[in-house]
């Protein structure tokens, strides 16, 4: 069992992890842009582990070869695993992959919150909405606009954009 996970604490730790990632890159050898794909993967897993431990789902981030180009990543509630498109490591600018990590980790947090309501600072109505949405999830290939606007996706998009811009 992990400790209580206050949403504001999670946000603070996540934004500081983003800041630390870029500050470290100024002294990191090699820096992200010059790093091999394996080194980039390691840098990003370290970034993820800094804030994911709060939800007890750390060490569950994997990069997968052969995912469709339009599929950046996914969180699997059954296995608690986050899979990211390995092609994201090819980009010299880490913003997209970092936002995808934060987006998918938000789904992990949503799942954790639903399953451990006493350990989070999320309102019951929100938890009920997320739970209903996960059970009635709209896939992007079925209806992209409905997919983007469903509660768990809107929340994850908002979270990742906010954490990166702050």
Image (cartoon, helix red, strand yellow):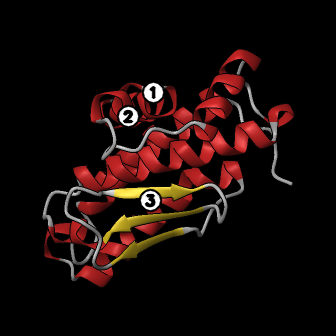
Mark 1: few/some/many CA within 10 Å (<14, 14-19, 20+): some
Label 2 near label 1: C-beta < 8 Å? Answer: yes
Marks 3 and 2 sit apart, C-alpha to C-alpha, by 28 Å
Quadrant assignment for the N terminus: bottom right
User: In the displayed structure, does residue 97 sit left or right of residue 109?
Assistant: left
Rendered image quadrant of residue 103: top left
Q: Residue at x 80, y 38 (%)?
A: 4
Label 2 near label 3: C-beta < 8 Å? Answer: no
Marks 3 and 1 sit apart, C-alpha to C-alpha, by 27 Å
Against 66, residue 134 (above or below) is above
Please tell me whether mark 3 or mark 2 is closer to you in this view.
Answer: 2
Marks 1 and 2 sit apart, C-alpha to C-alpha, by 6 Å
Label located before the other in sequence (3 or 1):
3
Rendered image quadrant of residue 65: bottom left
Q: Kindly identify which residue carries mark 1.
A: 150
Instruction: Say which of 71 and 31 sits in front.
Output: 71
Label located before the other in sequence (3 or 2):
3
């Amino acid at each position: 069992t992990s400790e209580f996970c206050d949403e504001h604490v999670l946000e603070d730790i996540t934004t500081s992890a983003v800041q630390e990632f870029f500050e470290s890159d100024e002294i990191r050898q090699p820096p992200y842009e010059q790093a091999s794909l394996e080194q980039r993967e390691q840098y990003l897993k370290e970034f993820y582990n800094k804030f994911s431990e709060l939800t007890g789902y750390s060490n569950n981030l994997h990069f997968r070869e052969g995912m469709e180009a339009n599929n950046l990543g996914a969180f699997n509630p059954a296995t608690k695993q986050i899979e990211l498109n390995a092609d994201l490591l090819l980009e010299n600018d880490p913003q997209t992959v970092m936002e995808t990590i934060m987006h998918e980790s938000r789904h992990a947090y949503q799942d954790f919150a639903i399953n451990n309501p006493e350990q989070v600072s999320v309102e019951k109505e929100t938890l009920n909405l997320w739970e209903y949405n996960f059970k009635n999830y709209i896939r992007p290939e079925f209806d992209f606009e409905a997919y983007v606007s469903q509660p768990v996706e809107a929340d994850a998009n908002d979270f990742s954009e906010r954490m990166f811009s702050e």
